[in-house]
Every structure is written in C-alpha cells, then in structure tokens.
Image: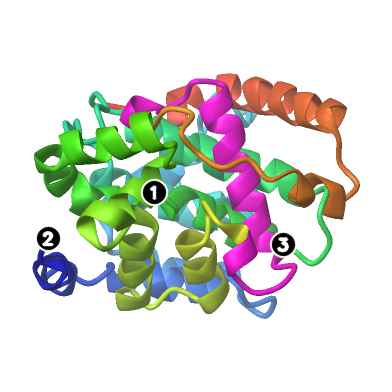
Amino acid sequence: MDIESILKDIEQLPPFPTVVTQAMALLDSPDTSAMDVVKVVQYDQAITANVLKVCNSAYFGLPRKVGSLREAVIRLGNQQLKEIILTGTVVKYYKNAMDGYALSKHDLWKHAISTAIISRLVSKKFKGVDESSVFTAGLLHDVGKTILDGVVDEYFSQMFALVGEKGYSFTEAEQEVLGVDHAEVGARMGELWGFPKEIVRAIRYHHAPQEGADSDPTTQAVYLANILCLMMGIGVGRQGLHVRGRDEVLKQHGMNNTDLQIIMAGFLDEYEKVQDIIMLG
C-alpha cells in the first residue's frame, strides 16, 4: 500500500474555516467579550443560524425567542458556544455513508457526537482535563476514517483475515495492511488544521493511550468514551468490538463499572435532550 498517496490526500484537504478557528481561539480566552465573538462570526450565515437555532431549542427552554446573535452568545456562554460552532462545522465531514467501515449515513456522526458528549462526562472524573478540549478531541477522534474509507474497502479482506484469524484489533490490522491507521491519519489532519497539541495527541492515541504522553488525561478520556460508545453499539460498523480494552485507565483514576454505568446513563439522558439540535439531516 502506498502511504504517500494517503498522506497526499490529507495535504489536499481544504483548510479548517478561518472564522471557526478564530472563534475557538477567542472562546478559549477568559478576557473575551460577547461582542468580540459576534464581530468574528456575524457574517457567517450558517454559524449564526445554527447558534440561534440551538439557543431557541427546547433544550434550553427559554421563556421567549432569542432574535439576535449577541443575545444568544451571552445566554449560551463560551463553552456551549464553542461546542455549537464546532459541531456545526465538523458535521459535514461525517455526513456520508462509509462502505469501507460499513457505516450507514449519519453513523459516524452519531458516534462522533456521542464520543464527544461521553468524553466530557468522563472528564469530570479526571483531574486536569479541559472540558472544551476533550469535547473537541472526542468529536474529531475518528475523522481519519473519512480519508481511509475507500482504501479500507479495497483491502478489507486482508484486514478481516488478520482480525478474525490472528486476533488483531481493527487499528492494528489497518496499520499492518495499509501502513497507517485512521488515528494517525486523523492526527495529521488535526495538525494541518492547526488544532492544539493535546487534541491532536488524543486523536492519534485514542486506541492506544499507553503510547501517548504518560498520564495524559485528555487522551484517556477520549479512549474510554470511544470504548463506551462501541459497547453501546453507537457507530460500530466493521470495527465492532475489535479494540483493546485497558483496565489500567480505570484503575489510574479510581473508577469502576458502577462509574461507567452512571456515565452511560448520564449520556443517554443528555443525548435524548439534544437529538433535535445536533443536525443529523
């Protein structure tokens, strides 16, 4: 397999929208005012429309409709606003079916948004994790599949043999047959788009947290969230449960199966509330 052709596909990707990058940087700063954010995003019709849509959704239950971007920004707060802008941008990368990974239309998006939500819930059990960063990493952790899908479809029989006959995990089979896996491809995309190092690292090692920086809680949170999503059957596809489970992540943070059940229950409750605003159409 020619890895260079895969990497060339990454290099030809369009840049991440400048307005989104600028807005995210502003929202990470405690000194940012509502008007600072409005000045950056007000001319982007899609972002403005989505922010107003979410702010006026049943999820927030406001007593009256919000009609201005400035009021919506004030009511939502920096973290929620960042998540809304990011999800509205990222959804386009996940909208298509993926034959290589046996994912129907919307499956990868459901898996991505679910992993992001669970990552945020998991992070509450960890120390030193920024909830906004871990949400972003969870949302983008499988973005490399959008590049590798066609290649995986072409070489799937070889990969399936490694998984079925030799006990490889799916990412190990990708690495063996293709010379690269979707986590590494996703990390390269994150670097191209200028995402912070902790987010790129979480994407790169979301199947192998032990290979990243020691005790990196962001990577570990995304790893655990991804496992929980697969356990619940969200966006499974061909990858299925052919992943490596690592009890040491739970032990390191003093967690047990009861904690996981509480997190999954919290996720199901939150996901039910936001289904109408995560743009599955």
Q: Is residue 246 magenta?
A: no
> At 9% across and 41% down in the image, what residue appears?
154
Q: Which of 267/11 is in front?
A: 11
Q: CA distance from mark 1 to mark 2?
A: 15 Å
> Is the residue 119 above or below the residue 28 in the image?
above
The amino acid pointed to by label 3 is Pro
Task: Decide if residue 132 is in sight here.
Answer: no
Residue indicated by mark 2: 1
In the picture as drawn, the residue positioned furthest to the front comes out as 166
Callout 1: SS: helix
Query: Mark 2 belongs to which amino acid?
Result: Met
Drawn side of residue 186 relative to residue 33, left or right: left
Q: CA distance from mark 2 to mark 3?
A: 34 Å
Residue 8's image quarter? bottom left
The C terminus - image quarter: top left
Real-space CA distance between mark 1 and mark 3, rounded to the nearest whole angstrom: 21 Å
Q: Position of residue 4 (x, y in %)?
A: 13, 73
Q: Secondary structure at mark 2?
A: loop
Magenta segment includes 218 = yes
* Residue matched to label 3: 217
Q: Nearer the viewer, mark 2 or mark 3?
A: 2
Q: Vertical placement of 99 versus 172: above or below?
A: above
Residue at 23% x, 53% y is 177
Q: Mark 3 falls on what kind of element?
A: helix
Q: Quick check: 241 above or below 113?
A: above
Residue visible at 83% across and 48% down? 125
Name the residue beneath numbered marker 1: 171
| Residue 11 position within the rendered picture, expressed as x and y whole percent measured from the top left | 16, 75
Residue 236 vs 36, above or below: the answer is above
